[in-house]
Every structure is written in C-alpha cells, then in structure tokens.
Amino acid sequence: MSSGPVLVERRRTWWERNGRRATIWGLRVAVLAGALAAWQLLSGPVLDPLFVSSPAGIVRRLSDWIADGTLLDHTWTTVREIVLGFAIGAILGAVLAYLIAPIRAVWAVLDPFLMALYAIPKVALAPLFIVWFGIGLQMKVLLAAVSVFFLVFLNTAAGVRDVDRGLIDAVRLMGGTRRDIAFKVTLPASMGGLLTGLHVGIPYALIGAVIGELVASNRGLGYLISDSSARFDTDGVFATLVVLSVFATLLNLLVNLLGARANRWRPLD
C-alpha cells in the first residue's frame, strides 16, 4: 500500500518569527531620532536653549557629570531610595491584599478608610515625614513606599475580589484546603491585578523618592534638579530627567520579565 503525502512543517525564518518586533523597535528608534534631530535643529533659531535646553547641551552636561563622578554619586542615592521604597511598598501591599481582600467582612469595614488614606496627596506627607524621620535616606524610602503601597494593594485586592467563586467552590468540593485555594486559585487568577499594580507603582516610586529629595535633601537626582533649577541650568534639569526616564524604563522591563514568568500561573481563558 502506498502511503499518503507527508506534510513537512516549514521552519520559519528569523524574520517571520521576529519581524514584527524588529519593525516596532525600528520605528521607535526612528521616532526618537527624528524628535531629537528636530529639537536640536530648532534649538537656537526657534527655541531658546535657556528654557528648553538642547540634546547637545544635555549630552555635554551628562558627560561632565560622569567625568567628575557627580552623576554616579547622586544616581546611586536615588536608586537605593527607589528600589527600597518600591520593594517595601509592593511587598506590603501585595501581602496585605491577599490577607484582607478574601475576607469580605473585614474588607467592607476597612474599604472607606483605605480609600481616604489613598486620596491623601503624597506630597503633603513629605513635611510630616521630615519631622518624624529627618531628611536622611529613611524619609525618601518611606515616601516612595507609601506611594507604591496603595497602588499595589488596591489593584491586587481588586484582582483577588474578582476571582471566580465557582473555582473556589470547586476546589473546596474536591477537598482542597485554604492553602490550595490561595496558591492554586486566588494567586494565579489575581496575578493580572498584582502586575498592574507593580507597573503603575514604578513611576510613583520615582515620584515619591524625588519629591523627598526636592523638599529636603543634599543628595540624589531630585537634589540635582533643584540645584540646577536654582542656577537656571536647564541642561542639568533635562539631563537629570533623562536619567530618571532611563531608570524607569529599566524597572518596567524588569517587571515585564517577571510578568512573562508569572503569566504561566494564570488560568487559561
């Protein structure tokens, strides 16, 4: 007997597998390069460099700060504040959300108080934190942590409360324990809320740390912004903003990598 035709799966080329991603990144680079070129060309003839700086001026300022160690010293101070504040706020927010949100009675009682605290502008807490903790590292870390805490807590709690009750009841009928429900149902199903909170919390960690440095500090990127602004050094202000943007992008990439791994836990739709 003759066998039928054998179908051989064609191996996809690199471009077929990664072409769309490469195109998107190419367009991003083109947009950035075009914006920087236009900014540099308009700086002087149209835009006053005293107020809007220029890409060349920003590069010169960054080069000077790198050469004399200013950038590394102040960046390391702010990085410590951001990382510690983000870690403390995210861990506390996630843990408390998983402990409180599943208990409906407790959540009903605490919900209005939590929302009232969340509504307080975190900038208003800076003077109070200075009185309590001084102007050292602790004050900026805690200000960043508070800024992150509520975002992670509320987003994670929303994910926990949206877990399908049918899944929980099914696990219970099969003899599952509270631990089984927590780690096999609640945690995977609420992962989207947790990751959303982490993503949103990244810029707020930067904001909290930099606000603390702007209010009272003699070190850090926030201090560089304040000092440069006081000396009408717009190159320095923009250079510091570039460093903050780069660091925020790196943190976002890290959260995306964690999210890609965490998505393996999520239930299939």
Image (cartoon, rainbow, N blue to C red):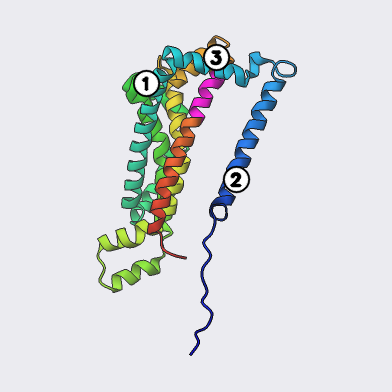
Q: Earlier in the sequence, mark 2 or mark 1?
A: 2
Question: Dot 3 lies on which element?
Answer: helix
Q: Is residue 49 left or right of residue 257?
A: right
Q: Earlier in the sequence, mark 2 or mark 3?
A: 2
Figure label count: 3
Residue 35, magenta (yes or no): no
Q: CA distance from mark 1 to mark 3?
A: 22 Å
The amino acid sitting under disc 1 is Ile
- Residue, disc 1: 130
Q: Position of residue 39 (x, y in %)?
A: 67, 24
Q: Nearer the viewer, mark 2 or mark 1?
A: 2
The amino acid sitting under disc 2 is Ile
Q: CA distance from mark 2 to mark 1?
A: 45 Å
The residue at the point 44 percent across, 29 percent down is 208
Please tell me whether the stretch drawn in magenta is mainly helix, strand or loop.
Answer: helix
- Residue, disc 2: 24
**Range drawn in magenta:** 237-245
Q: Report the front residue among 115 and 205.
A: 205
The amino acid sitting under disc 3 is Ser
